[in-house]
């Protein structure tokens, strides 16, 4: 699996997504152009919601879990059809296990030491978290030591009008949480927000949304 296969490289972080809302929320995001959907496991119903999203996702999309802390979490998510592994932290043993299970691995890092540990363990990309604390200056500095071509996804507080600055600093994608979705968000409200992120990404690339 390769992060280059999923465009735009925007991860929708659906914390607290009720299983009963998963199909409508997922369809809304997919219709807006999202192709990476994550349901954090630290809320009830996450695995059930992942299973629903996995059933409706097209072949060019990938669904999975966030806040995946253990090998058991990896087994639960893959058992539900999930193929995306996202964490807020760097645990090389669990990263390697998720990679062995065929998952697309995007573990959380905040320092160079964590970044290199994650990459050695097989991470396909890095979740820069918390992005609002690290800032674009921190990302630019981190970029000077990372291997060329390393995918870095800032997560935490990124708004559409800030994406171009993050991309200029070295971001290759983003994870978007509460600014995009909160429990109870309905499709009519979600659709324009989702589209604003996709459009901002396209504009920052110098292209138009298809």
Image (cartoon, grey):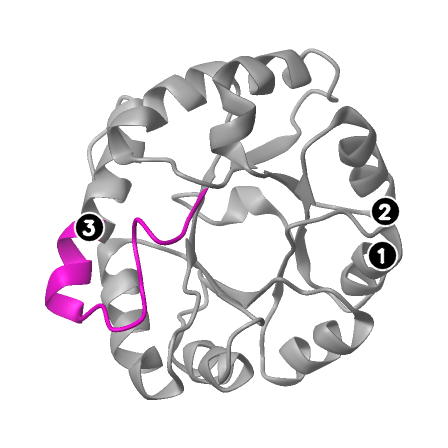
Q: Quadrant of residue 162?
A: top left
Q: Earlier in the sequence, mark 3 or mark 1?
A: 1
Up-down relation of residue 79 to residue 103 (above or below): below
Depth check, front residue: 6 or 119: 119
Q: CA distance from mark 3 to mark 1?
A: 35 Å
Label 3 neighbour load within 10 Å: few <14, some 14-19, many 20+ = some
Q: CA distance from mark 2 to mark 1?
A: 5 Å
**Image spot of residue 193 (x, y percent):** 19, 50
Under tag 2, what secondary structure? helix
Q: CA distance from mark 2 to mark 3?
A: 35 Å
Which residue is labeled 2 in the image? 121
Proximity of marks 2 and 3: CB atoms separated by less than 8 Å: no
Q: If the image is split into quadrants, where does the N terminus sit?
A: bottom right
Label 2 neighbour load within 10 Å: few <14, some 14-19, many 20+ = some
Under tag 1, what secondary structure? helix
Taking 16 as reference, is 133 left or right?
Answer: right
Q: Quadrant of residue 99?
A: bottom right
Q: Is residue 181 magenta?
A: yes
Which residue is labeled 3 in the image? 193
Seen at 28% across and 62% down, the residue is 29
What is the span of residues highlighted in magenta in the rendered image? 175-193
Up-down relation of residue 188 to residue 162 (above or below): below
């Amino acid at each position: 699996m390769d992060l280059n296969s999923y465009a735009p490289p925007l991860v929708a972080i659906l914390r607290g997504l009720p299983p009963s809302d998963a199909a409508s929320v997922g369809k809304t995001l997919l219709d807006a152009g999202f192709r990476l959907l994550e349901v954090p496991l630290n809320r009830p119903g996450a695995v059930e919601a992942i299973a629903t999203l996995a059933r409706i996702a097209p072949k060019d999309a990938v669904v999975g879990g966030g806040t995946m802390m253990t090998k058991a979490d990896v087994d639960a998510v893959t058992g539900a059809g999930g193929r995306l592994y996202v964490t807020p932290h760097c645990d090389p043993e669990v990263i390697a296990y998720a990679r062995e299970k065929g998952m697309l691995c995007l573990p959380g890092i905040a320092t160079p030491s964590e970044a290199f540990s994650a990459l050695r363990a097989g991470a396909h990309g890095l979740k820069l978290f918390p992005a609002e604390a690290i800032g674009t200056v921190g990302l630019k500095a981190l970029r000077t030591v990372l291997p060329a071509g390393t995918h870095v996804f800032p997560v935490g507080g990124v708004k559409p009008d800030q994406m171009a600055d993050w991309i200029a600093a070295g971001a290759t994608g983003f994870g978007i949480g509460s600014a995009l979705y909160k429990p109870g968000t309905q499709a009519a409200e979600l659709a324009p927000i989702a589209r604003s992120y996709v459009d901002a990404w396209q504009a920052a690339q110098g292209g138009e949304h298809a």
